[in-house]
Image: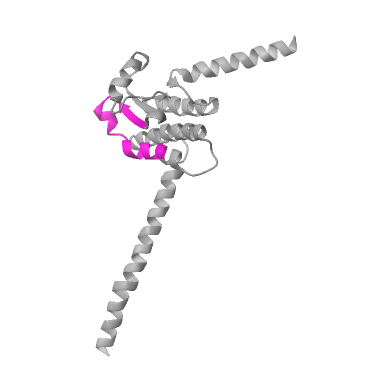
Amino acid sequence: MQKSKVWAFALLTFIFQTLLYSNNILKDDFITYKAGILINDISKESKDKLDINIYTISSNEMLKPRSNLFEYLKSYENNMSKPYVAVIFIPRAKRVGLIASSPKLAKMYNSGEVKSAMIGVVASIDKNSLEDKYNIALVQGVSELADQIAKFKCIKMEKTIPNDTKDLISIFQYIVYAGSLVVLWIFLVQPFIIRRKRGES
């Protein structure tokens, strides 16, 4: 009897949590349960703090070449509330898209940076399976999107996660800049100073 209650409670918890994030995840072809919870947490905080709905579409479909993602999204519009940003990820068709419900909202984030955060995860060389990378990429994309909108609105988010890819790129850029300055000093500035000193002497 006690076991039955435990199983019943576990089942109800699972159903409740599944329904909880199903409204934000419009299509779920490969999102794991854990990734779904993370995406839901970020989406819920975005709605509560930013008043923005973030929707996620993960699909294994093979779209026709040059398919229009705006047209693709129309089949989901009945389940969406404005204002929104839809994160569309269709890896088989090599398509990543962000669609905002208004041009004003689209100016609150950098679409290229959000896409790069997702693509960077998939392109990384590590021990994660391809499916794991897809899930990490979606979580990272939703997180980066929410962070950028929050920054635009000067609001602090708590559920988002750091963009390691962007951090690594920034570090790499600093290294390149520092290296360029060193090269500039060695080949241009230092010889000029030496020649000038010799000329004075």
Q: Return the x and y of residue 161 as percentages of the image width and height.
A: 47, 37
> Looking at this view, is 87 or 201 the one in front?
87
Within the image, what quadrant is residue 53 found in? top left
Name the colouring of the figure: one colour
Residue 90 among magenta residues:
no
Depth check, front residue: 94 or 37: 94
Q: Residue at x 31, y 72 (%)?
A: 187
In the picture shown, does residue 140 fall above or below 186? Answer: above
Residue 170 position in % (x across, y down): 40, 50
Q: Tell which residue pokes out farthest to the top in this image.
A: 1
Residue 46 image-quadrant placement: top left
Q: Is residue 177 left or right of residue 134?
A: left
Residue 52 drawn above or below residue 7: below
| Residue 24 in the image, given as x and y percentages of width and height | 43, 21
Tell me, yes or no, if residue 47 can be seen here.
yes
Asked if residue 101 lies in the magenta stretch, the reply is: yes
Q: Horizontal placement of 197 versus 42: left or right?
A: left
Residue furthest right in the image? 1
Image: 71 above or below 113: above
Would you say 105 lies left or right of 132 here? left
Q: Which residues are magenta?
A: 95-119
Quadrant holding the N terminus:
top right
Q: Does the rendering let one see residue 155? A: no
At x 36%, y 36%, the residue is: 115
Residue extending furthest toward the bottom? 201
Q: What residue is rendered at 64% in x and 17% in y? A: 10
